[in-house]
Amino acid sequence: MNKADEQECKLDAIIKISQLKKQYENDGVVTPVLHGLDFEVPKGQFMAIMGPSGSGKSTLMHILGFLDSLTTGKYFFEDRDVSGLSDDELAALRGEKVGFIFQAFNLLPKASVLENVKLPLLYSNVPPKDWDKMALEAIDSVGLTHRKDNLSNQLSGGEKQRVAIARSLIRKPSIIFADEPTGNLDSKSGTQVMEILQKLNLEQCVTIILVTHETYTAEHAERVLRVLDGKILRDEKVKNRRIASDGELLK
């Protein structure tokens, strides 16, 4: 992607959050989690959300990814106000617009790589005749074409996470959420996974929001939103961004 393409990619905000609050109520006890957050995410940005356990970062990701709903405030996604959508409406939007990558991979152990990657299409309107082609394209993008017929329980941890990335890409989502994607990996495999995500971001303009507690992992993003006690502590650009091994460090 050249600089002109990158500027065009990041012209509009894919996410706009205004005074977002979240609280849970159990047996009459109200527990506030998020306290009036305000921020935007431009289309094509790679942003990391960092914070200690209990800071609210996972709750925030669940709301942004339509896995949970906010209590008060406004959430605009691609200029659409999604703040008051029902669970069914959120589920439909999630299936169409969002890809997820989790720490635990969430693959079917006795299914092949190809079968695992096709899973999101079971709940789509995509004609079955197109499934294999779409899945093979996604598998190729993470460098696992040679493993497409292997069962997922025959793969290494890093390969499993690459399958999860391919699965998240198959419906060409507007945004990918990665929740501690390197948490179960050794440092080498974790770096490979981050390089794949970064390549998708830089070359295909895929918007990525990463939740992590690892500084090294967050340095592959271009922006870090630091959360503490349900509030934004700092919103900062990554000064010395780590870039894929075949590139240079971005300043």
Image: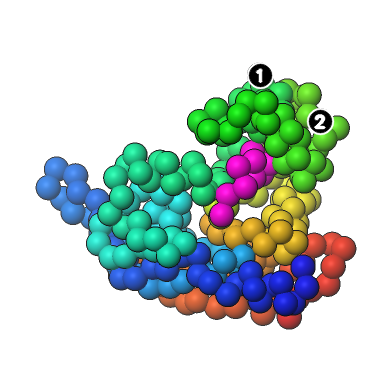
| Left or right placement of residue 48 versus residue 116 in this view | left
Query: Residue at label 2?
Result: 147
Q: Earlier in the sequence, mark 1 or mark 2?
A: 1
Q: In the rendered structure, does residue 169 fall within the stretch colored magenta?
A: yes
Q: Is residue 127 or residue 203 the one in the foreground?
A: 127
Measured as percent of width and height from the top left, residue 137 is found at 76, 40
* Circle number at residue 110: 1
Quadrant in the picture for the C terminus: bottom right
Measured as percent of width and height from the top left, residue 71 is found at 25, 57
| Left or right placement of residue 3 versus residue 234 in this view | right
Label 1 SS: loop
Q: Residue at x 60, y 60 (%)?
A: 207
Q: Dot 2 surroundings within 10 Å: few (below 14), some, or many (20 or more)? A: some
Q: Which region is colored magenta?
A: 164-174
Q: Is residue 123 or residue 237 the one in the foreground?
A: 123
Q: Is residue 88 or residue 113 the one in the foreground?
A: 88
Q: Is residue 231 visible?
A: no
Measured as percent of width and height from the top left, residue 145 is found at 82, 35
Residue furthest to the top in view is 110
Q: Residue at x 47, y 62 (%)?
A: 78
> What amino acid is labelled 2 in the image?
Arg
> What amino acid is labelled 1 in the image?
Lys
